[in-house]
Image (cartoon, rainbow, N blue to C red):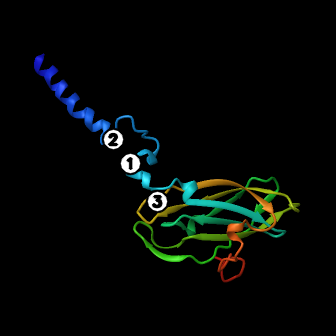
Amino acid sequence: MNTALASLLVLLFVATPVAARGEFPVGRDQSNPFSDPIQRKFLPANEAFRASAWRDDERLYVGFIIAEDYYLHRHRFALESRSPGVSFGELALPPGEPMVHASLGEIEVFYDQVVFSTPIEASDAAAETLAITVTFQGCSDLGLCYPPEQVELDALYGSPPAAFDSPPRDTGDSEEGAP
């Protein structure tokens, strides 16, 4: 009995300072990968990949501002309408930068920013705001790849947000930029 009590006290004295320094996973939120001290250097997806949407009479545009040292996968974009009676044609994506990804092989990615578009197919979507859901996936250059993410946006009629004022090299509107 005394040996068991002595072992328990030794374990308590050893584990307490380790837990206090955060080296022992006591009290850490296991459901949030960003609570891990090693993972804290990574931005949450909504900060690493900031999305905006806007539209004109014929097309819907989606733009992403991508944080430094992060990138988006070209082949992982999808778009869904949440506005009744509105659908979209094929996404027109600009060419990305070629990359050899450790697990995906040869892919194309976007750094800094990307703007893509799609034709609006609607019975009567005049100058209405369009509610959309955008699916995307990105990674950090330091090795963390996020699971596919979704963001809900409202695409207002009019000009692009200030961050996208200067025309990108290719918004995917032309045949050259089409996938």
81 to 90, vertically: above or below: above
Where is residue 118 shown, x and y percent of the image? 73, 69
Residue wearing tag 2: 22
Q: CA distance from mark 3 to mark 2?
A: 25 Å
Q: Identify which amino acid the numbered label 2 is placed on.
A: Gly
119 to 33, vertically: above or below: below
Q: Identify which amino acid the numbered label 1 is placed on.
A: Pro
The quadrant holding residue 103 is bottom left
Quadrant position of the C terminus in the picture: bottom right
Determine if residue 61 is in view.
Answer: yes
Q: Is residue 39 left or right of residue 123?
A: left
Residue wearing tag 1: 37
Q: Which of labels 3 and 1 is toward the front?
A: 1
Q: Residue at x 60, y 70 (%)?
A: 113
Residue wearing tag 3: 145
Q: CA distance from mark 1 to mark 2?
A: 8 Å
* Residues at discs 1 and 2 in contact (Cβ within 8 Å): yes
Where is residue 17 shown, x and y percent of the image? 26, 35
Q: Callout 3 environment at 10 Å: few (<14), some (14 to 19), or many (20+)?
A: some
Q: Identify which amino acid the numbered label 3 is placed on.
A: Cys
Q: Is residue 39 left or right of residue 116?
A: left
Q: Residue at x 69, y 70 (%)?
A: 164
